[in-house]
Image (spheres, helix red, strand yellow):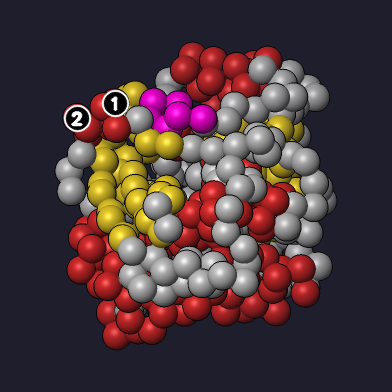
């Protein structure tokens, strides 16, 4: 077992990409897709291998091999902040938001897994867990689903003990009330119901939709307008029914974004993504900003990663159990967590993330 005082040089960084088709065509208010690409990273130091992953375009794997591996190799595996800063410096002139930050995030997660294994502890412990588990909400309800599919998926989560669920709206606004009504009937009166427009509305349209959905007990309206429209978000927040939280943040790539959102009073809850913010290191920096402004956070996607990092953040209220990512985790990751009683809890007896890639199962999906 390594000691914190010992320098452990990183000897290898490898990235790969796997494109996994969705179980059926999927869409939200502003986008359609039929596959999800997983970016997997292996790092090695002192004969120990760390594993990390994220979700992005396959080009992220190429970026890891061409730009990030050479920067990280030779650095101290026990000094992750230094490696994270080095990756930021290396990519300054090609731009951090988007693909670059996702690539950095996948490497960062692998480095945390490696360090935790070197110290023989769970990543959740290494990050400084404040609690034993994190509540989740079931997330899917795509606009491509018919009413039966929509009801079955969201009611299934409630029946499994998850007391809050989210559906997509905004692609066909004239049908949204019908769809929300159908879901409320399926999940019952007690479950919390969230909606996500993915920026499909103008501020005026979003306020009209919020008023129409109030009767169905909707308590969460995510990205009613584009996350880039901070004035619009604030306007919707100020005019929405009492008890309906306005939320955004999945397209925040750094702490500066979250500070602007907090300073301008744009939302009730912010949603940092453990992939897009640059892994656990970036996520924690964004969470510190939210804490300084007393703003709650709910992590966006990647629930297997959120299960660790959300335990260390003081303002976390829950994490998103996103259908696509949870499905892929069950297919390709040995040790994938399933919610119990509506919460995810890492197995602290397993060092690191407690996850390994099922190489034979993943092989047919590899694209880079």
Identified at 66% across, 56% down, the residue is 126
| Horizontal relation, residue 197 to residue 40: left or right | right
Checking the image for residue 175, the label placed there is none
Q: What residue does disc 2 label?
A: 364
Q: Residues within 10 Å of mark 2 (few under 14, many from 20)?
A: few
Task: Judge left or right: residue 118 versus residue 314.
Answer: left
The quadrant in which residue 360 appears is top left
> Residue tagged by mark 1?
361
How far is the residue under mark 2 from the one under mark 1? 7 Å
Vertical side of 141 occupied by 40: above or below: below
Apparent side of residue 243 relative to residue 282 in the rendered image (left or right): right
Residue 283: x and y in percent read 58, 63
| Image point (62%, 78%), residue name | 260
Q: Are marks 2 and 1 in contact (CB under 8 Å)?
A: yes
Region in magenta: 330-335
Residue 248 in sight from this viewpoint? no
State which quadrant residue 248 falls in: bottom right
* 164 shown above or below 243: above
- Confirm whether the magenta stretch covers residue 7: no
Neighbour class for label 1 at 10 Å: few (<14), some, many (≥20)?
A: few
Q: Nearer the viewer, residue 133 or 254?
A: 133
Secondary structure found at label 2? helix
Decide if residue 44 is in sight here: yes
- Residue at 33 percent across and 70 percent down: it is 73
Whole-percent x, y for residue 228 in the image? 49, 70
Q: Position of residue 56 (x, y in %)?
A: 33, 53
Residue 322 point in image, percent of width and height: 52, 37
The image quarter containing residue 96 is bottom left
Residue 334 shown in magenta: yes
């Amino acid at each position: 077992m390594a000691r914190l005082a010992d320098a452990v040089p990183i000897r290898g960084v490898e990235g790969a990409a796997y494109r996994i088709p969705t179980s059926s065509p999927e869409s939200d208010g502003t986008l359609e897709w039929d596959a999800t690409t997983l970016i997997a990273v292996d790092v090695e130091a002192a004969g120990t291998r760390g594993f990390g992953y994220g979700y992005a375009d396959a080009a992220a794997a190429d970026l890891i091999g061409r730009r990030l591996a050479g920067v990280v190799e030779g650095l101290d595996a026990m000094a992750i902040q230094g490696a994270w800063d080095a990756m930021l410096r290396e990519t300054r002139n090609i731009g951090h938001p988007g693909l670059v930050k996702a690539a950095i995030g996948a490497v960062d997660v692998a480095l945390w897994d490696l360090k935790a294994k070197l110290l023989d502890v769970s990543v959740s412990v290494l990050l400084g867990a404040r609690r034993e588990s994190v509540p989740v909400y079931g997330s899917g309800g795509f606009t491509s689903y018919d009413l039966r599919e929509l009801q079955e998926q969201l009611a299934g989560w409630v029946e499994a003990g998850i007391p809050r669920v989210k559906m997509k709206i905004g692609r066909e606004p004239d049908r949204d009330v019908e769809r929300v009504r159908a879901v409320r009937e399926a999940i019952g009166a007690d479950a919390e119901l969230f909606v996500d427009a993915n920026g499909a509305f103008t501020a005026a349209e979003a306020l009209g939709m919020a008023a129409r959905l109030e009767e169905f007990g909707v308590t969460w309206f995510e990205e009613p307008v584009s996350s880039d429209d901070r004035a619009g978000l604030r306007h919707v927040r100020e005019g929405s029914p009492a008890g309906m939280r306005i939320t955004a943040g999945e397209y925040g790539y750094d702490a500066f974004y979250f500070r602007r959102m907090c300073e301008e009073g744009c939302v009730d809850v912010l949603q940092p993504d453990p992939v897009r913010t640059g892994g656990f290191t970036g996520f924690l920096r964004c969470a510190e900003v939210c804490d300084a402004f007393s703003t709650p956070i709910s992590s966006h996607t990647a629930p297997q990663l959120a299960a660790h990092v959300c335990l260390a953040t003081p303002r976390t209220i829950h994490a998103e159990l996103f259908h696509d990512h949870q499905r892929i985790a069950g297919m390709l990751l040995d040790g994938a967590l399933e919610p119990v009683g509506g919460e995810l809890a890492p197995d602290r007896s397993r060092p690191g993330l407690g996850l390994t890639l099922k190489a034979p199962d993943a092989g047919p999906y590899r694209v880079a």
